[in-house]
Every structure is written in C-alpha cells, then in structure tokens.
Image (cartoon, rainbow, N blue to C red):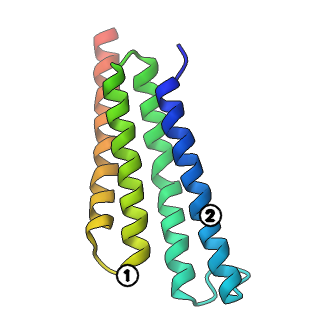
Amino acid sequence: MPLEITAIYAALLGLMLLVLKFRVIGARRRLSVDVLDGGERDVTRRMRVHGNFAEHVPMALILMAVVEINGAEAWNVHALGAVLLISRVLHAHGLETTPGKSFGRAAGVIGTTAVIVSAALLALRQVIDLG
C-alpha cells in the first residue's frame, strides 16, 4: 500500500523545512555570522524555528505513515497531516515574529503535540485490533 497521503504532507513539510533553512542562511549572511548565532538574536530565533521543526516533524510523519500503512481511514490521515502543517506554519510565524509568548507559538505546540499523541494512540489501537 503506497503512502500517498503521508507523502503529500511530507513533501509540503519538506519544502517548509527548506524555507526555514534558507531564512537562517539569509540572516547569517545579512548579519555576517559564520558559525552558531554570533550573538545575534535574529539568527538565534531563526535557528530555533528551524530546529524545533526538525525536532518534532519527523516523529509526527513517522506516526502518520504507520497509521496510514496499517489501514487508517483517509480522512484520519488527512486530518493529522492538515493539523500538523497548519500547526508548524503557526509555530514558525509565532516564534519568528514574537520573542515571547504568542498565539501562533502556543497553537503550534498544542497542534503538533495533539498530532503526535493522536497518531501514537491510533497506532496502538490498530496494533491491538490487529492482534
């Protein structure tokens, strides 16, 4: 069974990862920072947006793939993917534009966590039902 639904979200999120990467590179060039953050808050913030994405999205996509391959209904997988994509956009925007707390950052954390928890529980339920 091909992972067509997960593939859509993996592709979109992969492109988003590249956008975040190039935003870090752009800030480094603009501020003449070669390594780490050079003490520049803008570079630090962009690095954290990129790093946070890289820390959380892979597990969410792995879990989406697991539930899809184990026969989850298409709407379930699309719901997980849509919430993940929207959450990551909100998180990136919120963290990059506001140094402290923001709606986007909070919504992104909650949405991403909800996707990981929901997909993990669904995967466990699928295994129990299959066994």
| 128 vs 31, nearest the viewer | 31
Q: Quadrant of residue 89?
A: bottom left
The quarter of the picture where the C terminus appears is top left
- Name the spot of residue 103 as percent of width and height, x first: 25, 68
12 in relation to 45, above or below: above
Q: Verify CB contact (< 8 Å) between mark 1 and mark 2.
A: no
Tag 1: amino acid: Pro
- Name the spot of residue 116 as percent of width and height, x first: 35, 42
Which residue is outermost to the top? 131
Residue that numbered label 2 is attached to? 21
Distance CA(mark 1)–CA(mark 2):
19 Å
Q: Residues within 10 Å of mark 1 (few under 14, many from 20)?
A: few
102 in relation to 106, above or below: below
122 in relation to 131, above or below: below
Tag 2: amino acid: Lys
Rendered residue at 32%/34% (across/down): 79
Q: Is residue 119 left or right of residue 23?
A: left
Residue 131 in sight: no
- Name the spot of residue 101 as percent of width and height, x first: 28, 76
The numbered disc on residue 99 is: 1
Rendered residue at 43%/64% (across/down): 92
Q: Residues within 10 Å of mark 2 (few under 14, many from 20)?
A: some
Query: Is tag 1's residue or tag 2's residue first in the polypeptide sequence?
Result: 2
Q: Is residue 88 left or right of residue 73?
A: right
